Amino acid sequence: MAGWEDIRTEVLSRIRSKAWPLGTLIPGEEALAQEFGVARATVNRALSELARSGVLERKRKAGTRVAALPVRKATLDIPVIRAEVEARGAVYGLRLLRCEMATPPLPVLARLGQDLGQMLHIETLHLASGRGFVVEDRWLNPAILPNPLPDFAAISANEWLVAHVSFASGDISFAAEAASPNAAAALGIPPATAVFVTERCTWAPDAPITWVRLVHAPGYRLSTVL
Amino acid sequence: MAGWEDIRTEVLSRIRSKAWPLGTLIPGEEALAQEFGVARATVNRALSELARSGVLERKRKAGTRVAALPVRKATLDIPVIRAEVEARGAVYGLRLLRCEMATPPLPVLARLGQDLGQMLHIETLHLASGRGFVVEDRWLNPAILPNPLPDFAAISANEWLVAHVSFASGDISFAAEAASPNAAAALGIPPATAVFVTERCTWAPDAPITWVRLVHAPGYRLSTVL
DNA sequence: CTTTGGTTTATGTGCAGACATAATAGCGTT
DNA sequence: AACGCTATTATGTCTGCACATAAACCAAAG
């Protein structure tokens, strides 16, 4: 019984064995379907999957070829912070450090692409079993918030957003930086320690929702399988 | 004309509009297919796609429900370093700092899970338009290498591997660290600067292939869309 | 009351055939 | 030689049907 996963495996092994070297144009779906004795749809499923993971490149009419410079594609899970803490077997806690309307600094405005005037500025310290885990520095578009405001000391802005506001698109980036005095104090680490920083920016179809910057405690690793 | 992308869009908007709140069990494929006037396979395609991106959770017999704590899934591209440098409009260069058989340190052995005895230790400095871009510290399983060795001063081990050795599985992780004196010297930066570090470990079906650690120059960002 | 085992049911995957679409390749024109 | 149109063709997607499989549910046995 040849399922699409078997086809995928077979194709992969042909690539690995150099039967189909890098850059080669491989046979069309019709031909492969016949060879393997399956429907074309099954071959299509297998090849699409391989294309998604970066092993193959497909173009209409041009055919399917083995990627010359394979760009590996890895999938990252971006969980809610509470889930991340609990997944480590720690008890989640949070401390609201700041929550006030203010004018966002220039870099934030630049990322949002427009000036919304004053925005809600929230700083939260997320705790894992009482120890500082992440410092969250967030700017929220007030237009999307209800009145009165949610109690961000009870539920993190992070979680409130995923539950109440649905976003259309966004981007995320990771970097290493020296901890600012502010963040270092919150996390209880020496200033200028190397910290892992995540920056995220999310958009509703029409308006920006939020810009957020997470400073992770030292030792934080982001990992996934290839 | 209702394509699977239209179905996906419609389902997404129902989730966003809270017509189907978080955690809800949504109608079965059969029902949706009838409602939208498409085949069940089309609905399946749309829902599978949404499940892959973390918006839905599907289980046989249990049905499909809106994810209660959405775990966003982002896809990272892991390009070959040369491609990464050239994508920035810079000229790629490399300098081989070390290439010798040696006994890997304990952490490396631990990640590989077995002791292969001596391995090939390669240190490479990758340059972008003459400036240090990445320091690569790599340990290779000698069993997979040809004799004589490839000229790693001409082609980076990175590229040689993707072209000549096909791997089955691997993992990758990212962290922030203080630059070691060694790496700092190679990159021409002050020691203990915060640097972005990538660690990768790849396996052939049977044996380990390589362990590698990339220390990126300050300012490096890893980014993607959500 | 707990465990075991069968039944039911929603999703997962398969097949064959069809049409849609994009992009190349070749032709003809200027 | 350069340009633009058309025919060709491989992939992308849809339909309608079928069977496989996992898991929840329920009922009977211990």
Image (tube, coloured by chain):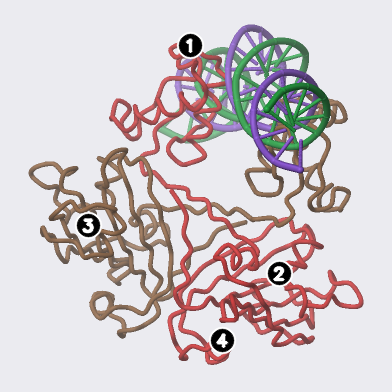
Chain colours: A red, B brown, C purple, D green
Residue under disc 4 on the same chain as residue under disc 1:
yes
Q: Which residue in the protein does label 3 denote?
A: B139
Mark 3 crowd level (few <14, some 14–19, many ≥20, 10 Å Cα): many
CA gap between label 4 and label 1 equals: 61 Å
At numbered mark 3, what does the secondary structure look like: helix, strand or loop?
strand
Q: CA distance from mark 4 to mark 2?
A: 18 Å
Q: Position of residue B226 (x, y in %)?
A: 62, 56
Compared with residue B201, is residue D17 higher up or lower down, i.e. above or below? above
Disc 4 with disc 2 on a shared chain: yes
Mark 2 on the same chain as mark 3: no
Mark 1–mark 2 CB contact (< 8 Å): no
Name the spot of residue A128 as percent of width and height, x first.
59, 75
Element carrying mark 2: helix
Q: Secondary structure at mark 4?
A: helix
Say which mark, if any, is on residue A158.
2
**Type of the residue with mark 3:** Trp
